[in-house]
Amino acid sequence: MSLFGSTSGFGTGGTSMFGSTTADNHNPMKDIEVTSPPDDSISCLAFSPPTLPGNFLIAGSWANDVRCWEVQDNGQTIPKAQQMHTGPVLDGCWSDDGSKVFTASCDKTAKMWDLNSNQAIQIAQHDAPVKTIHWIKAPNYSCVMTGSWDKTLKFWDTRSPTPMMTLQLPERCYCADVVHPMAAVATAERGLIVYQLENQPSEFRRIESPLKHQHRCVAIFKDKVNKPTGFALGSIEGRVAIHYINPPNPAKDNFTFKCHRSNGTNTSAPQDIYAVNGIAFHPVHGTLATVGSDGRFSFWDKDARTKLKTSEQLDQPISACCFNHNGNIFAYASSYDWSK
């Protein structure tokens, strides 16, 4: 069951721009649509952590807002609150206790939204749009990590206007993920860096990209004992790389697979190839979901290297996705993504 089938104002409804009377494909899976969705393209989705009772969903959008809904057990959604930036919101995340939401924006700032008081304050500043934001909870510190198109990764303790630490990136930050004690950051020009977060953040390794095209999304996965052990990296060329940090057999264990392409992946006929816009790992089973500009989501088993299921095709790209904390809800956002 999904919760997001929102539509933006691009050719929505049952008729296309050319006046054809096609079936309404904005929600072909008949998934539950969130009430009062954002008014423009949705850039990010995140469910509340397990520390909060119930399920709350946040979404950031190109209408400069971040919205929060309560998701009831029957799937119905209740709009709770929203906050504004002065530019599109590109990413959002929760604090580990669920009391705060952090947002990153094209207005070159990041904000901390206290859900109890419904107040939002600026906690970070960059010289260019902020593309990624993550909460880091380490045994000896906690902070917010922001990645920007100004080619820096900054760490903020939320109380000081100056960062605790600034790390230079080789290029603009395009996507990132954090699962303590590991962070993965992918940049323009196919840059890929893994950081270790013990004691204080530091660069662990620069990795030659396993993909030949622009990086679009990255998600860290865990091993059987719940430790981060590698990541999945998606590109604009309908492909995902599975990369282990310290595999027993790198040549065998690391691999890439094609996805989000028209007429199957193993045909010699010409293909339409779409961007992979998001990757999310199931918190219990370790399977992964990918969403793409082709307007489909798919579920995969990386260990068996098999595809489990693909959705029907929506009439717009799927721009973001996420699982809730126990993995029984999958949310996805359908909206224009500038891919064509």
Image (cartoon, rainbow, N blue to C red):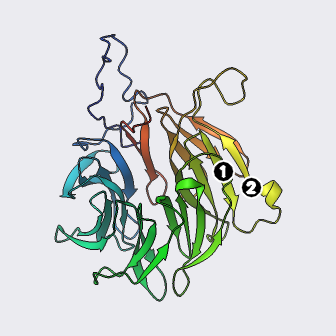
Report the disc number at residue 254: 2
- Is 6 above or below relative to 186? above
Dot 2: within a 10 Å radius of its alpha carbon, few (fewer than 14), some, or many (20 or more) residues? some
Q: Which residue is mark 1?
A: 241
Q: Residue at x 16, y 71 (%)?
A: 117
State the image coordinates of residue 60 (x, y, percent, origin top left). Answer: 31, 53
Q: Secondary structure at mark 2?
A: loop
The answer to whether one can see residue 74 in this image is no
Identity, as a three-letter code, of the amino acid under mark 1: Ala
Mark-to-mark CA distance, 1 and 2: 8 Å
- Considering the image in quadrants, where does the C terminus appear? top left
Report the disc number at residue 113: none
Which quadrant holds residue 155? bottom left
* Side of 116 where 130 appears, left or right: right
Q: Nearer the viewer, residue 112 or 173?
A: 173
Which quadrant holds residue 284? bottom right
Dot 1: within a 10 Å radius of its alpha carbon, few (fewer than 14), some, or many (20 or more) residues? some
* Side of 179 where 165 appears, left or right: left
Q: Residue at x 66, y 56 (%)?
A: 209
- Considering the image in quadrants, where does the N terminus appear? top left
Is there a contact, CB below 8 Å, between mark 1 and mark 2? yes
State the image coordinates of residue 17 (x, y, percent, origin top left). Answer: 30, 17
- Is 309 above or below relative to 301? above
Among numbered discs 1 and 2, the one appearing first in the sequence: 1
